[in-house]
Image (spheres, rainbow, N blue to C red):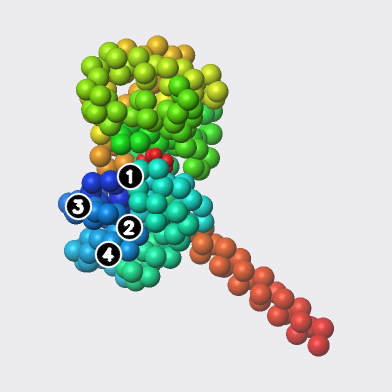
Amino acid sequence: MSKKAFGIDIGGSGIKGAPVDLNTGELTADRVRIPTPQPSTPEAVADAVAELLSSFDLEEGMPVGVTFPAVIKAGVAQTAANVDDAWIGTDVDALLSERTGRDVFVVNDADAAGIAEVQFGAARDVPGVAMVITLGTGVGSATFVDGKLVPNTELGHLLLHGDSAERYMASSIREKEDLDWETWAGRLQEYFSHVEFLFSPTRFIVGGGVSKKHHKFLPLLDLKAEIVPAELRNEAGIVGAAALAHLERKALRKSEKKAAKKAEKKQAEAAATS
Ligand code: BGC
């Protein structure tokens, strides 16, 4: 049976979405992209997400997963490194569910990309610690232990030269400072050596748009762990968010059933003693 969910990737410049076949990790329709509203306040982004969803003819009740570049706990954004500060403290699950009339599940963008790599790409079947590091405007991380996610690890904010590492080695910094590949690779070497020293991963998987040019910088890095490009590239966020929304829905249904059984049992016990 085909399992489907809808994935949406909210980025600084664009909001992209498509339905995903969760058996294969493939998009089942062309991806739609709309520009991220500026300023990217919660209200404006929620309207854009609703607009994007309304351009698809989706089954009733299809779970929707959304990526967001912040720490997300129980659906609430806790940080806002490269997005509008108004997001801090926003219940993103509730806002997007209310605005779209669907059951929306939000997740950190790097965690979503990581889940996609674990299920369908370069992080599949990695024993021990696998780390997906996304190089973009900021630097995101998804950490897995035997395939299980440790959420919100935020390793782009490790301190390097007295500041968040992402301010030194993100892909956006390479562009802004017009660094050649060798100079940028030198910065990446410092970063990855530090992360390797702290976590001893089995494999690093490098994502973000720049990963399609991996041959320009990955061969320059010298690490004990394997370091490979992400396989899903542009679609990792959409696929991972959809996969997590489906899993979350399953977990929710399971706990609902468990609660219903518990209540039934309590009722039966009360009836027997009355
Ligand atoms: C944010 C992370 C995010 C990463 C990539 C960082 O600045 O703190 O939450 O995963 O950028 O977008």
How far, Cα to Cα, is label 2 from label 1? 21 Å
Choose the circle earlier in sequence order: 3 or 2. 3
Quarter holding the C terminus is bottom right
Q: Check disc 2: other Cα within 10 Å, few if <14, some if 14-19, many if 20+.
A: some
Query: Mark 2 — residue?
Result: 41
Q: Check disc 1: other Cα within 10 Å, few if <14, some if 14-19, many if 20+.
A: many
The disc label shown at residue 35, or none: 3
Against 127, residue 137 (above or below) is: below
Looking at the image, which residue sits at the far bottom? 274
Query: Mark 1 — residue?
Result: 237
**Residue at left offset 33%, top offset 44%:** 237
Query: Mark 4 — residue?
Result: 47
How far, Cα to Cα, is label 3 from label 2? 13 Å
**Residue at left offset 39%, top offset 65%:** 95
Percent from the top left, x then y, of residue 152? 49, 42
Choose the circle earlier in sequence order: 2 or 4. 2
Choose the circle earlier in sequence order: 1 or 3. 3
- Amino acid type assigned to the residue bearing label 2 in the image: Thr
